Amino acid sequence: MADGLTTTLNGLINKLSGLAIPADLSLWQLALPAWFLVCFGVFYWYVFGRRSPFSVDSLRRKGPTEMNMSKRDEVLKKAFSEGRVPKGLDAVVIGSGVGGLTVAALLAKVGKKVLVLEQHEQAGGYCHSYTEKGFQFDIGLNYVGQLHENSLDRVAFDQITEGQLDFVNLGEPFDTIYIGQGQTQRKYTIYTGKTEMEAHLKKQFPDDTEAIEKFFQVMKVCARKTHHLACLKLIPRWLALFLLKTGIADVLSSVYRYSSMSHTAWLDQLTSNKDLHTIFSYFFYGVPPKDSSLYVNALLIHHYKRGAYYPKGGASEIPYHISNTIRNYGGEVLVSAPVRRILLDKNGAACGVVVGNSDSEVEVKAPIVISNCGLFNTFKNLLPPQISMKHEIQERLHRVKPGRGSFMVFCGFDATAEQLDIGPTNIRLYKDNDMNKMMDRYFNMYKEEAPDNVPMMLVTFPTAKDPTAKLRCPGKSCMTLVTMVNYEWFEEWKDMPVTKRGDQYLQYKTRFAKHMFDWACLHFPKLKEKLVFQEVYTPLSNSHFLGAYQGSMYLQHNLDLFDPVFMAKNRCDTPVKNLYLTGQDVFSCGISGALHGGLLCASSVLNHILYWDLLFLKKKLKKAKAKQDAQQAKKKLH
């Protein structure tokens, strides 16, 4: 039988390839290359053979920015009703932040029918904008990096918005940092550019050029090897833990060591210059550098190396265009739809959600449930107690903490950017160059001390960044002030109605706002006389409007969160079958972090590593661009 099979295989292969095969080859000699071909075929099918949400044909000709607010509201403020729920849902997504919209768009583009539910009256999460008295403010977005032509993030955004997003480069410097107060205050500027960022820092710190070079070397490794950390969430959990616990992962890449290394501990070995320490740590997210990861801080600076960008039309352009993509592929995005709990079937698997309030509840059934409302909200508030108390869930909850609360002051001015002498550059203010002592002292203050002692603040002017602002808000300018606070300072008012928290609450948050505004006016003295509008958002505002757990935008980005072993465990799939997590809590903070949270989640849901497809498309686009550039250069020569 073996001889007959060999002869048959010989004949078949000869017919297929036209190659002469010696008759004396054994079955096993033929089987080995055949087995290799089968394995290669399976791998090729797994990587490229399934339907991909990415293609050059996904892009449409870019249209003009939609300025009609009624038409924008039709997209971003489509209210929930039972009759608007699509039939035959494949997945329901809780929350319409960038992470939720990204995974929804990706699933929709491969033929899944998806519904996104948002508790607020407008889609977008921390990426939405709101308009009040003629002023438009962004809730969370200040700027985004890594959006240069054919970058991975830019290709991803183009794919989930069908090429409709337009970004404005903020120019140089994109950040200005002031350290200290009064006569001893020092000013530093941060430039973009593959070589310019490093060179400009060296000009400002001529005695620390070697330290800057070493930091940029580590920064380069962290940026280029980020995919090694992402892989921990994509490969089988047992394999990821095996590689980490045996030390094989550390041999393969140094990024695993940098991820779990204290930022301050590493900087102390690099230089004693505290101002330079502050520059290397200046993206404050509520965690002192001594308790944060070297990898995260290095990656945040690298994120803007190729430019700092702002979405033309404001932050809400992002959810506006992703929502359109979801609907174009048969899905839906509905707001004013608070999810009360996740439905489980008799086997304990997620099978839908309950939407509404105690007076009127609607069950929305779907075989897949994806949560973009955060790890704490999902596990603590949306699951039955007997499920949330499971060891695997409690183990994950015990390793993380909510981030610090966000405190924002939105200011409107009856003057143009030119009249106020403001521009697109973000201003970051620090009262001290010892960030560890400064932040420890501040976050350990008594509640009554804190409002008059804010030690760090971001000042940003969204209307100065956006060329369409002159059309949307003619003759007006906006400013947003941001700092971090303890949720506990505001906790006594958390159970009161949002508009009836009393005079004490108003007076308390006004003290913060006054201190922050006066501080900003030291740098921009023309602001004070032109102020006509001011609104303050506390952690309680974030909890009420956006469902933020304890008013925080994301998990506390400490060393525990970026311990590689925990990163391997903190993945998109959960101990509850058919329940997945997406967004910032899956990987890291920011718009880019949420975007990749969505990519990771879609990969898990589809059991298809979408990054292969995205990288393949990126390579194709870069090749086409290089060809186009070569043709244009050739034409110029002639």
Image (cartoon, rainbow, N blue to C red):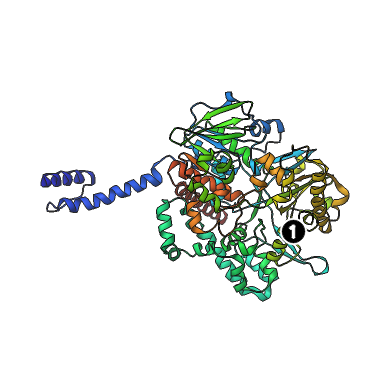
Disc 1 packing (10 Å; few <14; some 14–19; many ≥20) = some
Q: How many marks?
A: 1
Which residue sits furthest bottom?
A: 207
Task: Find residue 110 and report its horizontal and vertical position in percent.
Answer: 47, 37
Residue 309, can we see it? yes
Q: Which corner quadrant of the image does residue 187 belong to?
A: bottom right
Task: Find residue 21 and report its horizontal and vertical position in percent.
Answer: 17, 51
Q: Nearer the viewer, residue 472 or 598?
A: 598
Q: Residue at x 53, y 61 (%)?
A: 259
Circle 1 is placed at which residue position?
A: 445
Taking 455 as reference, is 209 above or below it?
Answer: below
Q: Quadrant of the N terminus?
A: top left
Q: Nearer the viewer, residue 379 or 275?
A: 379
Q: Residue at x 61, y 74 (%)?
A: 210
Q: Left or right? Give the position of 603 relative to 24.
A: right
Which residue sits furthest right?
A: 529
Taking 209 as reference, is 623 above or below it?
Answer: above
Q: Residue at x 52, y 30 (%)?
A: 330
Q: Left or right? Give the position of 457 relative to 147.
A: right
Q: Which corner quadrant of the image does residue 171 belong to?
A: bottom right
Amino acid carrying label 1: it is Met
Q: Secondary structure at mark 1?
A: loop
Residue 105, can we see it? no
Task: Find residue 455 and report its horizontal and vertical position in percent.
Answer: 75, 60
Q: Nearer the viewer, residue 259 or 609?
A: 259
Q: Quadrant of the C terminus?
A: bottom right
Q: Which corner quadrant of the image does residue 549 belong to?
A: top right
Task: Find residue 99 and report its horizontal and vertical position in percent.
Answer: 57, 44
Q: Nearer the viewer, residue 209 or 276?
A: 276
